[in-house]
Image (cartoon, rainbow, N blue to C red):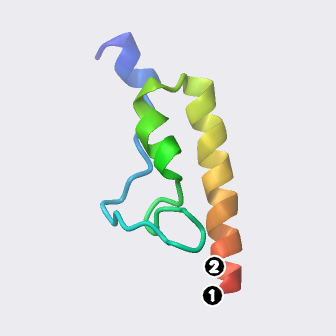
Amino acid sequence: MSENSSTEIQSPCISVCAMDDLTGLCQGCYRTIDEIKAWWDMGLEEQKNLLIALEERQLQQVSFD
């Protein structure tokens, strides 16, 4: 196993790719278009921070449904 693969974070995409017109977020992974585009260019720390933000977004979305 290479050193790089052990530190790679899996994309939060769950293949439910549909943008919500009201929130501007993907209905599957809760990312914006810009966050989706930038994922592979983000550093490890940026990805971790985004994953934390996505969890918070998901909890907020669920509480409003």
Report whether 56 appears left or right of 1.
right
Residue under pointer 1: 65
- Disc 1 vs disc 2: Cβ atoms closer than 8 Å? yes
Q: Residue at x 63, y 79 (%)?
A: 62
Please identify the quarter of the rendering in which residue 5 is found. Answer: top left
Q: Mark 1 and mark 2: span between their CA atoms?
A: 5 Å
**Percent position (x, y) of residue 21?**
51, 72
- The amino acid type, in three-letter code, at marker 1 is Asp
- The amino acid type, in three-letter code, at marker 2 is Val
Residue under pointer 2: 62
Q: Quadrant of the N terminus?
A: top left
Report whether 12 appears left or right of 65.
left
Name, please, the residue furthest toward the top: 3
**Percent position (x, y) of residue 15?**
30, 60
**Circle 1 — which element?**
loop
**Circle 2 — which element?**
helix
36, 3: nearer the viewer:
36
Q: Quadrant of the C terminus?
A: bottom right
**Percent position (x, y) of residue 43?**
54, 22
Q: Residue at x 44, y 50 (%)?
A: 12
Q: Residue at x 61, y 30 (%)?
A: 46
Indicate whether 45 appears above or below 56: above
